[in-house]
């Protein structure tokens, strides 16, 4: 079952054109004041005419015009301009607004009666005229407001709405009908009631067509598209759902106010990535002309194209008028799904390749056949706790795979090579972060070598919202399951950005084309994970700690409480792109190549995780296992 949500309706475009013909000044608040004044004046004239049998003698006309001016000023003043005034939206005028109108009109009538009775010398007016004026004014003023409401409904009423049947009891049906009348989500054809004594009568203008037992025949005979259960505790709910489902009719629940207040029904809404990132990072969607010129007419190779980052790179690059787009990934299903998303008219040739970047023959054959000019390298093992238990695979994929691509890019004279890195490469405490830092150093070492024209670049950013394994989908799954949300440390902070933002950084870094430098995005201040989790819960319409528990379960191997985007001694500079910063490449130590060769050999030999971690400690990457800052361990997220 699903909670009631907005049903799609198709508006009548002709009516929208009619609505545009209404002058805006006609709906202004001052116009409403004027209309109420004119209504009061007309009511006074009609009261005199009725009181004197449609013939007001000349001696009474002076009195009529005097009191007409009084009520024409006092009535709109009482309704609109005084303290405690009556204010209602005419488009949604209902019975309660009518009662409020009557109550706020009474003081003027009492005041005029009091003046007529107590103040000598005022123009004579029969008491019956003042009472008649009050009644006539209420009729005219209410008619004016009802006319405005009916006109609004006629103009904006959708012409194609789902045909709905409401199932409920005596206490919930009237409220449900009024809800659908005001909101217009569906066209209510009739009602079905559990109460037998309601059969064949009308409730709020809608007929009760029968009991729940007749639902099947009613769905067919009235061509019903939606069944609405009015209330969460109907005895017939299970049978209604079975009957409607058997005919492929949608079922929605409209909870009553008592259901909501008693906690029998919890309503939450989906959370979008844009809601989460709003206020933390400004989203810029326009493509810089430098990026367009860099990619136009080129052959682009994207590794890890089936991943969350890689697939977004494919989507954005496909819009840059590239000549050939080569998508490389070892996941066949991801590549297959991605092909249908690529905008073919903007790309002359789309090449899907299923293979592994660690396979020398696959990489070499790809470069020989398609001669890529730009390589965007997003393929990597990235999950920290998983790589702590698979150190050899992390080295072979993140380092050796990158090594294969770098060698091929130099050999085949590629123009640009961009590697996607991570903030976990800064002072790494995890095997994954250490392997990415080594890949950065490898790129910096090869970029400084002479005799080739390839521009090497690294792009480093923090957590990507919505990517596989990021906290957002994990938190959303935990919320959907009713909680708890699990976090590893109360003080843990992270930088956050969206996948499109991260990819725009990758493309901008590719356009700059430096020699081994690292680029990063201005992501603002780091955000505490526990505050981020609470924000997601609130955006879902729930209360942290009450509806959804937030539980601290302890840090995992390789995690740090705080991540950094660069080291203490890094030289940070501006770039032509306002939100992108550049970290100058450092000189790689002379013994780096020898130590890297030993590490890769140990990984190929499938040495133990302990040996791999010892070799990582010897490399100049400031890797320390004792920096993990572990509390009692727990597997979470």
Image (spheres, rainbow, N blue to C red):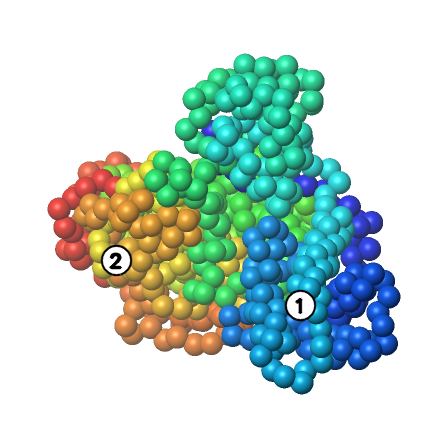
Task: Tell me where residue 550 appears, x and y as whole percent.
Answer: 26, 48
Residue, disc 2: 492
Quadrant in which residue 295 is drawn = bottom right
Quadrant in which residue 124 is drawn = bottom right
Does residue 436 sit above or below 484 in this rendering?
A: below
The answer for how far apart the CA atoms under marks 2 and 1 are is 77 Å
408 relative position to 51: left or right = left
Q: Residues within 10 Å of mark 1 (few under 14, many from 20)?
A: few
Does residue 137 sit above or below 372 in this rendering?
A: below
Residue, disc 1: 127
Task: Tell me where residue 310 appears, x and y as whole percent.
Answer: 51, 47
Residue placed most toward the observer, 539 or 299: 539
Residue at 56% over, 62% down: 103
Helix, strand or loop for disc 2: loop
Helix, strand or loop for disc 1: helix
Q: Residues within 10 Å of mark 2 (few under 14, many from 20)?
A: some
Dot placed on the residue nearer the N-terminal end, 2 or 1: 1
Does residue 179 sit above or below 143 in this rendering?
A: above
Residue at 78% over, 57% down: 19
Does residue 495 sit above or below 186 in this rendering?
A: below
Quadrant in which residue 177 is drawn = top right
Residue at 40% over, 72% down: 584
Task: Tell me where residue 431 appears, x and y as whole percent.
Answer: 26, 49
348 relative position to 469: left or right = right
**Camera-nearest label, 2 or 1:** 1
Residue placed most toward the observer, 194 or 289: 194
């Amino acid at each position: 079952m699903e909670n009631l949500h907005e049903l799609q309706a198709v508006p009548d475009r002709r009516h929208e054109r009619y609505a545009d013909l209404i002058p805006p000044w006609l709906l202004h608040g001052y116009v409403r004041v004027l209309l109420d004044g004119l209504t009061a004046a007309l009511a006074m004239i009609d009261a005199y005419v009725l009181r004197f049998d449609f013939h007001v003698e000349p001696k009474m006309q002076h009195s009529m015009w005097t009191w007409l001016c009084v009520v024409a000023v006092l009535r709109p003043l009482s309704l609109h301009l005084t303290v405690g005034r009556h204010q209602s939206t005419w488009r949604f005028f209902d019975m309660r607004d009518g009662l409020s109108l009557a109550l706020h009109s009474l003081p003027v009538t009492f005041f005029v009666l009091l003046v007529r009775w107590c103040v000598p010398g005022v123009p004579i007016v029969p008491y019956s005229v003042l009472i008649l004026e009050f009644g006539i004014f209420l009729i005219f003023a209410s008619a004016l407001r009802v006319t405005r409401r009916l006109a609004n409904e006629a103009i904006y009423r959708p012409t194609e709405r789902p045909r709905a049947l409401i199932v409920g009891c005596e206490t919930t049906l009237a409220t449900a009908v009024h809800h659908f009348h005001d909101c217009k989500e569906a066209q209510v054809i009739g009602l079905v009631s559990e109460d037998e004594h309601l059969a064949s009568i009308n409730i709020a203008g809608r007929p009760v067509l029968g009991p729940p037992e007749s639902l099947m025949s009613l769905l067919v005979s009235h061509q019903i598209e939606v069944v609405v259960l009015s209330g969460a505790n109907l005895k017939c709910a299970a049978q209604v759902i079975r009957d409607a489902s058997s005919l492929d009719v949608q079922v929605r629940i409209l909870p009553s106010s008592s259901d909501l207040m008693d906690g029998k029904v919890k309503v939450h809404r989906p959370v979008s990535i844009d809601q989460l990132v709003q206020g933390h990072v400004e989203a810029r969607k326009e493509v810089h002309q430098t990026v367009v010129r860099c990619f136009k007419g080129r052959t682009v190779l994207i590794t890890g194209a089936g991943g969350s980052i890689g697939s977004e790179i494919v989507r954005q690059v496909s819009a840059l008028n590239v000549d050939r787009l080569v998508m490389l990934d070892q996941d066949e299903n991801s590549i297959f799904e991605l092909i249908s998303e690529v905008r073919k008219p903007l790309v002359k040739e789309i090449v899907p390749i299923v293979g592994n970047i660690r396979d020398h023959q696959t990489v070499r054959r790809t470069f020989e056949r398609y001669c890529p000019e730009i390589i965007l390298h997003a393929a990597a093992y990235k999950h920290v706790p998983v790589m702590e238990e698979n150190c050899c695979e992390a080295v072979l994929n993140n380092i050796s795979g990158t090594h294969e691509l770098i060698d091929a890019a130099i050999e085949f004279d590629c123009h640009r090579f961009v590697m996607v890195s991570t903030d976990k490469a800064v002072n790494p405490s995890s095997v994954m972060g250490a392997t990415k830092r080594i890949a950065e150093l490898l790129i910096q070492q090869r970029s400084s070598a002479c005799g080739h024209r390839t521009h090497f670049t690294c792009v480093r950013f923090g957590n990507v919202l919505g990517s596989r394994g990021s906290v957002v989908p994990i938190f959303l799954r935990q919320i959907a399951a009713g909680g708890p949300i699990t976090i590893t440390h109360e003080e843990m902070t992270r930088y956050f950005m969206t996948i499109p933002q991260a990819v725009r950084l990758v493309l901008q870094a590719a356009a700059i084309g430096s020699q081994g430098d690292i680029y990063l995005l201005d992501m603002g201040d780091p955000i505490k994970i526990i505050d981020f989790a609470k924000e997601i819960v609130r955006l879902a319409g729930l209360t942290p700690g009450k509806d959804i528990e937030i539980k601290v379960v302890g840090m995992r191997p390789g995690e740090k409480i705080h991540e950094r985007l660069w080291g203490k001694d890094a030289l940070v500079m501006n770039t032509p792109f306002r939100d992108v910063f550049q970290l100058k490449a450092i000189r790689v130590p002379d013994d780096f190549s020898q130590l890297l060769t030993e590490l890769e050999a140990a990984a190929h030999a499938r040495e133990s995780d302990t040996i791999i971690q010892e070799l990582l400690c010897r490399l100049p990457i400031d890797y320390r296992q004792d920096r993990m800052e572990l509390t009692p361990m727990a597997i979470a997220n």
